Image (cartoon, rainbow, N blue to C red):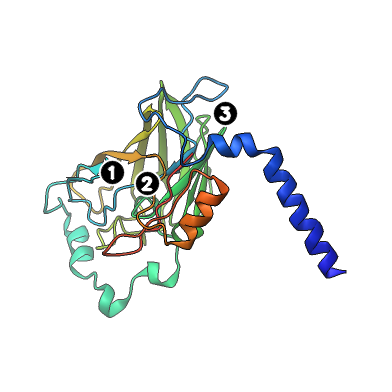
Amino acid sequence: MRRRAVIWLIAAVAAALLIHAPVLRGQSVRAKIDMKAPAPRLPNGKPDFSGIWARPGTQDLTQTFTNGNGTSNRGEPNPLPFTPWGQAQWDNYNPVKDGDYAGSCMPFGWIRSFTPHPMQILQNNEYISFLFEQSTMFQVVNTEGLPHRKDWPPTWFGDSRGRWDGDTLVIEAVNFNGYTKLGTIGHPMSDQATLTMTFKRPDFGHIQFSWVLNDPRTYTRPISNAERKYSMPACGCCSRRDRRCRLVRELGWATCGFKTASNTTASWYGI
């Protein structure tokens, strides 16, 4: 009985692949993707950020760099403008001795989740969702300009609400629990912080992302990172011996994983 069920399942999958063969071929690694084509739009006319995006690895928000794949970051001057309280948080951060909350599978919070692993964005007229590969975390944000929720418990990601400023999506997050770090090296933020993030899609292949953190308990002025460009290049594999790459090529999906010499990045590109 079980064998018969497996055979039927295989037959159903094969039939589905045949039915959708034109679609799969359109998304294959052989398809030419115009990275500078116009950005897609939602039914309401706003930019559609949906896709799978590679992002720069910014573990230190004071870094400014441009990667070979087009991703980049413009960081803050070093040292950061700490308040006495913020300086104490920074000086006393010792993940080797005390551990880091990320090692206990706690939520990373917004800024730390954006790097270094990839993410998928899904979007409609009312909501945008961020599906992070790291720890399979996700966030769903309303984009209709709703007010922040009252009596909402503090969290790692805070209470996030989105609105449109022309073709720019603005997401504001408040009500943090005060435990979140802004990067792997431990730059702090407090429960008094307001995080404002902006997203632009100037063309098909890139997102321009910037953020401003207003946290008077931790910093003497707002701090920010700007123009992080998320590239969505045509699929390519560094090693065809990678089983995952072979599977992707056989199925014709426009997604692909690759490895670097220094570490396994598991970055997925495609549409």
For numbered disc 1, what is the local secondary structure?
loop
Residue 58 position within the rendered picture, expressed as x and y whole percent measured from the top left:
26, 52
Disc on the earlier residue, 1 or 2: 2
Q: Residue furthest right?
A: 1
Q: Residues within 10 Å of mark 1 (few under 14, many from 20)?
A: some
Q: Residues within 10 Å of mark 3 (few under 14, many from 20)?
A: some
- Nearest the eye: 84 or 133: 133
Disc on the earlier residue, 2 or 3: 2
- Nearest the eye: 119 or 162: 119
Is residue 1 visible in the rendered structure shown here?
A: yes
Cα distance in 3D space between marks 2 and 3: 24 Å
Q: Is residue 256 above or below residue 5?
A: above
- Dot 2 and dot 3 residues touching (CB under 8 Å): no
- Nearest the eye: 39 or 261: 261
Q: Which residue is mark 1?
A: 69
Which kind of residue does numbered mark 3 sit on? Asn
Q: Is residue 115 above or below residue 128?
A: below
Residue 11 position within the rendered picture, expressed as x and y whole percent measured from the top left:
77, 53
Viewer-nearest of discs 1 and 2: 1
For numbered disc 2, what is the local secondary structure?
loop
Which kind of residue does numbered mark 1 sit on? Asn
Q: Which residue is mark 2?
A: 54
Which kind of residue does numbered mark 2 sit on? Ala
Q: Which mark is residue 125?
A: 3
Residue at x 34%, y 70% (from the top left corner): 100
Viewer-nearest of discs 2 and 3: 2
Residue at x 64%, y 38% (from the top left corner): 21
